Every structure is written in C-alpha cells, then in structure tokens.
Image (cartoon, rainbow, N blue to C red):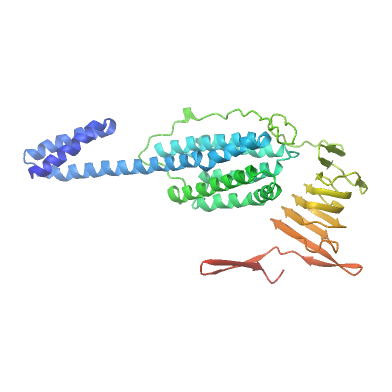
Amino acid sequence: MELLLNKLDALVSKLEKAGGKGSQAANDIRAQLNNIKKGKLDGLASVVESLEEKADDSAGASDLSASVASFDSILSGPLGQFKTASQAIGGDVATLGDLVGSTFDMQKHFLQTVSASKQPKADDLQKLLKPTSEMIGEIQQFRESNRRSEMFNHLSAISESIPALGWVAVSPAPAPYVKEMKDAGQFYTNRVLKDWKEKDNTHAVWVRSWVETLSELQAFVKQFHTTGLVWNPKGGDADLSVIPSKPAIKPKAVPKAAASPAKPSPKAFKATTATQKPPSLHQDGKKWIVEYYKGDQNITIDQIEMNQSVYIFKCEGSAIKVNGKCNNIIMDSCKKTAVVFDNVVSSCEFMNCNGVQMQVLGNVPTIMVDKTDGCQMYLSKEAIGVEIVSAKSSEMNVMVPKGDDFVEMPLAEQFKTIIEGSKIKTSPTESV
C-alpha cells in the first residue's frame, strides 16, 4: 500500500510541475491523496479516475498536435519543392506559386485553430474559412485574367485542382473529394509534361511536386479527419480576432531563359459585361490570336510558321482557315465554330466549347477535347493514326474518310469498370 501511495504521489508531483490546468487538477488530487494516507480508502477510486482523465486529455492533445505537425510536413516537403520549381520557371507560374503557398498557410492557421478549439457556430465557421476560400478564388481568377499566358496550362492545372483545400467543408468522406480535385487537374498537368518533355525538366519537377502535394493532403485527411473535420471537444472558443488577412502577392519577372513577355500585375477578375468586344485577328509573339468573331465564315491565317500557335477564343458561328504548318491550335470557349488546317506539329485542342468542328487536310498527331459538348473531327487519310484524348466531354464524333465520303464514328462517353482481384479493367459500354 505504501508503494502504491508513493507512485501516486510521484504522478501528482508531475502534474504540479506541468502548471496550468494540470496544476489545478494536481491540487484536487493531492487533497484526496492526503485523506487516503489517513486511512480513508474510499477516495482512491476518485484519484484513479482523475489521473485517467488527465491521461486521456494528454493523449487527445497529442493527436491534435500530430495532426498539425503532419500538415506542416506537407508544406515543408512537396509543397516547398513546388514553390521552388515555380520560382525557377518564373513569370506567371512564380506568381501562382506564391498564391498557392499563401493558401496552404491560411489552411495551416485554420487547422491550428481547429486543434485548439471546440466546434464553433456555423456563422463563426464561415468567418474562419473565409481567408482560405478567398485565396482559392484569387487563384482561379488569376487563371481567367491570364488566358493568353504561355503558361496557361500551368495556371489551369492549379486552378482546376486547388479546390481540394475545400475538404474542410466536406463530410462524411473528405479524402475522396481531395482525390477528385487532384484528378480534375490531371488533364492540364499531362499537357505540361507533354509540352515541356524535351525542353526543360523543371516543369516535370513542378508537376510531380504538385501531384505529390495533393496525394499527401489526401493521406493526411484520411488519417486525421476521416469522416470530416475533427475539432477539439475539450478546447475553448475559436478566437475570431486572429483570423489572418489575405496577403498581397506581387507579379514575378520572367527569367531570361523564358520567351514569354512580361505580364501585368494580377487583378481581381471582373465579370464580363454586356458590352460586346470587337473581333480581332492579330499576332502576339509566336501566337496568332483570333477572338470575339461572330458569324464570320472567312477568317484566314496565311503566313504562319511551324513554331507558331493559333489561339481561338470566344468565337461564335464562325470558320477559321489556317494555311501552312503550325505548332498547335487551341479553340477555347467557342460556339458553333469550325477550324480547318493543313498540318499541326503538336496538337489541336478544344476546351469549354459547344458544337464545334475541325478538319485536318494533312496531319495532326494529337487531338484533345476537354469540357466540350459537341465536337465533330474530320480526318484526312494522313491523320488516321491520330491520338484523341477526351475528358468531361460529350457528343464527340470522328469522321473517317472512305472513298469520296466520310464514315461517322462516335467516341465513347460511358464506361464500364470491372474489379478483378487487385486490378481494374475499364471498357466502353456496349451502347457506345
């Protein structure tokens, strides 16, 4: 009995040295322990319960602390590599890297609040989430206001996947949501890898570190917030007075090795007004830009070179003819518009379009279709071996030459997946 009392006395002494709430609990236990030493054993159970409660509190605090430390390791690990690669690329990508870094910092501050606080009211929760939400919005606006950027695929890859940080508002399964957002950006990260494969390995590092960042975020959420955001039930009220404000991000200069022109400072994106912008066909460096045409069937680009590209934006009811051989053609946010071209070195791409057509008279290695409803692709005999990559699109048809006519072949929109042991097999459904 004396040995047991000595051990209890030692444990109480440790609580006293811990200070704060631990010291207060030690004083209560000490009083009960003195009664036990005097022979009042009925207080022993109370002492044991108090010590167990303190042990549970300590374990809970340790788990919450581990959660914040785990998130911090993402910031110092793959996200740190992503930010370094962004600065190495420079220009719009460097600015984007700063925006992404600040967004993760906002979420870290939020998670620190979560680990120390009990769940707040809905209105207070929205105030705590606002800084992260605003940063996500700014990243997406930055992409929209820099559609002519030579690094547009980089901006799109992040803009499509950065909503993964919105997992904090998802339940009961936030981890799959993170994966869904990671997959949403894959179309553009693949483009970055393809475009820079033999030019600059920094871009491959950039893609790899970003994908790893989201993968580790998914693992973090699955481990510590499996069914939703976990608050500290023994914590105090969330401190709304220390909510961080949105930082000011300055645009970065393009490195000397890059060919892209300097970009203006990022500004808040404003919704398009009802005022119709005038149509324009002009050359900007190595890019031909065709934009805002309506009902014009006679748009022609003649003096194009093999290292130049064509960007067609927000045209409606129009047709563009590209004579010669160019690097690639992109049609973005167009309706009922067609493009006819001779030869393309890289790819012809459609994104955010509706009811569009293309016809290749020579050769095109790759056709990419993303978020497009209605796309007719007329191929030449030379282009029969083309690779077609599609995502989130419908009503896609390939017109293959047969004699003097074309045979229409629909692309798959629905798929069937079968799990066989540890493997997955996916194939188009029979209705396609």
Residue 241 against residue 50 in the figure, above or below: above
Question: Residue at (63%, 42%) from the top-left corner?
Answer: 202
Please state if 309 lies on the left or on the right of 216 as rendered.
right
Q: Quadrant of residue 93?
A: top right
Please state if 52 lies on the left or on the right of 38 as rendered.
right
Q: Quadrant of residue 423?
A: bottom right
Q: Is residue 209 visible?
A: yes
Viewer-nearest residue: 261 or 108: 261
Q: Residue 223, position in %: x, y?
A: 44, 50
Q: Residue 208, position in %: x, y?
A: 58, 47
Question: Residue at (24%, 45%) from the top-left corner?
Answer: 52
**In the image, farthest residue toward the right:** 298
Please count the marks in the image. Answer: 0
Question: Residue at (57%, 48%) from the top-left corner?
Answer: 211
Viewer-nearest residue: 36 or 358: 358
Please state if 118 lies on the left or on the right of 23 as rendered.
right
